[in-house]
């Protein structure tokens, strides 16, 4: 049994994306599962196999993002897989992923900013916060993609504890979002401090961008990787907000049609 966890709030497109993501679970996942949603705007209600949590928190971006690190508080299964709302399941490799994780926080290294220093070089960031965190992380430490990750809710608890310590260093009560201080940025600190993580192959979280992540269509399936990985594996999750772009653009007809079908386009 595994829980698929989401956070949702804000524009209606996020709720529309969530519906497609849940449909992909129902259509393509064969292992026993539950679904857990932290609904920041209180629009959804619990139903069969779907538990919805409403939290009384400030309506600020940093809380919306960070609620993914509270799923462990509400999940009732040993393993939880967080996914952004604009993700669809392609292949059920859940049992394989759980075994590979070895009960570490299982997450992909970021596909275009591999190290913490690369993130700082390529993104405007609130320097007052970066200076406050000096000494917690090395510029050569790895950076992570927080759109999908798998964890054991008890054995990886220190990651969540550390995350909220970092959050409270970055954000005082009532403060607004600070440039570049995203959940990924704070997760990078938490994981590099605890060392309680294992890198998953990039096929866990594929963005459908040719220039960022290699992808191919073979044996009637999608195979992908991060750009620095030598081998491709069957894609578990495709990641794209289809309200903003067409994930099938730039591919041949067969691959394009397959991608559209995965996203119910």
Image (spheres, helix red, strand yellow):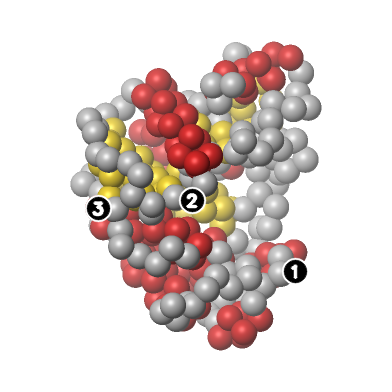
Q: CA distance from mark 1 to mark 2?
A: 29 Å
Judge left or right: residue 234 versus residue 59: right
The image quadrant of residue 219 is: top right
Asked whether 52 or 247 is in front, the reply is 52
> What residue sits right under mark 3 in the picture?
74
> What residue sits right under mark 1 in the picture?
121
Where is 153 relative to 193, above or below? above
Secondary element at image label 3? helix
Q: Residue at x 47, y 65 (%)?
A: 60
- Locate the C terminus and report the quarter of the image it occupies: top right
Where is 25 relative to 253, above or below? below
Mark closer to the chain start, 3 or 1: 3
Q: Position of residue 162 (x, y in %)?
A: 39, 72
Judge left or right: residue 37 versus residue 15: left
Where is 249 relative to 147, above or below? above
Which mark, by number, is residue 10? 2
Q: Residue at x 75, y 64 (%)?
A: 122
Mark closer to the chain start, 1 or 2: 2
Q: Position of residue 210 (x, y in %)?
A: 75, 35
Where is 33 relative to 148, above or below? above
All told, the count of numbered labels is: 3
Judge left or right: residue 257 versus residue 234: right
Badge nearest the viewer, 3 or 1? 3
Mark closer to the chain start, 2 or 3: 2
């Amino acid at each position: 049994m595994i829980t698929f966890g989401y956070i949702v709030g804000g524009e209606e497109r996020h709720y529309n994306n969530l519906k497609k993501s849940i449909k992909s679970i129902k259509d393509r996942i064969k292992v026993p599962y539950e679904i857990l949603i932290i609904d920041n705007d209180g629009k959804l209600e619990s139903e069969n196999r779907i538990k919805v949590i409403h939290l009384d928190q400030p309506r600020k971006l940093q809380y919306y993002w960070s609620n993914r690190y509270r799923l462990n508080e509400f999940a009732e299964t040993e393993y939880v897989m967080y996914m952004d709302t604009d993700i669809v399941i392609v292949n059920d490799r859940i049992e394989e992923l759980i075994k590979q994780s070895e009960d570490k926080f299982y997450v992909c290294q970021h596909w275009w900013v591999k190290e913490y220093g690369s993130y700082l070089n390529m993104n405007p960031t609130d320097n007052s916060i970066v200076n406050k965190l000096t000494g917690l992380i090395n510029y050569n430490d790895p950076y992570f993609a927080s759109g999908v990750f798998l964890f054991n809710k008890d054995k990886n608890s220190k990651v969540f504890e550390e995350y909220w310590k970092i959050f409270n260093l970055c954000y005082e009560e009532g403060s607004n979002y600070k440039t570049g201080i995203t959940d990924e940025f704070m997760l990078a600190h938490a994981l590099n401090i605890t060392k309680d993580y294992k890198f998953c192959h990039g096929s866990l979280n594929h963005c459908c961008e040719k220039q960022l992540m290699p992808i191919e269509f073979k044996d009637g399936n999608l195979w992908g990787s991060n750009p620095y990985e030598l081998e491709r594996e069957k894609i578990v999750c495709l990641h794209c907000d289809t309200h903003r772009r067409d994930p099938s653009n730039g591919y041949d007809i067969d691959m394009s049609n397959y991608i559209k079908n995965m996203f119910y386009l």
